[in-house]
Amino acid sequence: MPNSTSASLKLTVQATGENSGTWGQITNTNLLVLEQAIGGYEAVGITSGATLTFSNGVVSNGKNQILKLTGTISGNVNVVIPDSIEKTYIVENATTGSHTVTFKTSSGTGVTWGTADKGKKILYSDGTNVLEALSSTGALRVSGHILPGANDTYDLGASGNVFRDVYTGDLHLTNKFKEKGNIVDGTKGNWTLQEGENDIFMINNISGDKFKIKLDKVKGDL
């Protein structure tokens, strides 16, 4: 039985009894390709677009995990990977020129950087299309929880780099994990803010007491 080739990384799958005297060389090449796929980096010039290569049994630029797209583009360009490839990428659009860059499969759809978008994206190909998992410049969309790496350690935004608006349901507030309490009376609390039809309520999660925030309706222009 002759050797075969894997579907995505085009590794040489060696058949029993084949490659006498060259088995080690083929295995080493396969390991280099795996190293590319796990953490390989390559800058790829895409002045007029590019088709990334996935040659059988050899190191190829499309097999890298991290790609930096470079060059001065004078029009909208495509970066194309072959159909049927299943792979993840971290891609940086480092081109110059106010034109779009689309990373796609040969026959399917892809992900596009806008004319002024020079950010990084985490992409994946499902074998048919290229899709976006995460962008450094676009909206972050997740299907699960977002949790910090450590408790009471990291901030959301900064004093000189604030979020414009915050949309949320109930708001839970606690300082019980801090070494010291608040700067007014030094105590620690645990509160939940909830919305009513006509009122806003605060619930003390320690005592169970419930409070209504006093609201004065504004009539006319101030």
Image: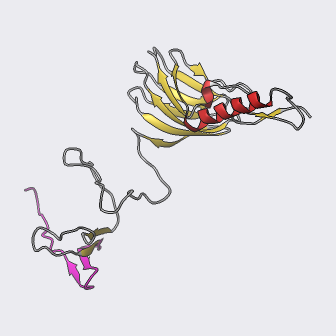
Residue at 55 percent across and 19 percent down: it is 49
Horizontal side of 30 relative to 155 (left or right) equals right
Q: Nearer the viewer, residue 143 or 16?
A: 16
Report the residue at 25% width, 85% height from top. Answer: 207
Viewed as shown, does residue 96 lie left or right of 25?
Answer: left
Q: Is residue 163 magenta?
A: no
Looking at the rendering, the stretch of residues picked out in magenta corresponds to 194-222
* Magenta highlight: main SS: loop
Reply yes or no: does residue 198 show up in magenta.
Answer: yes
Q: Position of residue 20 (x, y in %)?
A: 86, 29
**Quadrant occupied by the C terminus:** bottom left
Task: Name the image quarter holding residue 78.
Answer: top right
- At horizontal 33% and vertical 68% (from top left) the residue drawn is 170
Q: To which quarter of the image does residue 220 belong?
A: bottom left
Percent position of residue 141, x then y: 46, 50
Q: Position of residue 80 (x, y in %)?
A: 61, 26
Residue found farthest to the front: 21
Q: Nearer the viewer, residue 15 or 170?
A: 15
Is the N terminus in the top left, top right, bottom left or bottom right quadrant? top right
Q: How many marks?
A: 0
| Residue 177, image quadrant | bottom left
User: As displayed, is residue 61 above or below residue 201?
Assistant: above
Drawn side of residue 101 relative to residue 118, left or right: right
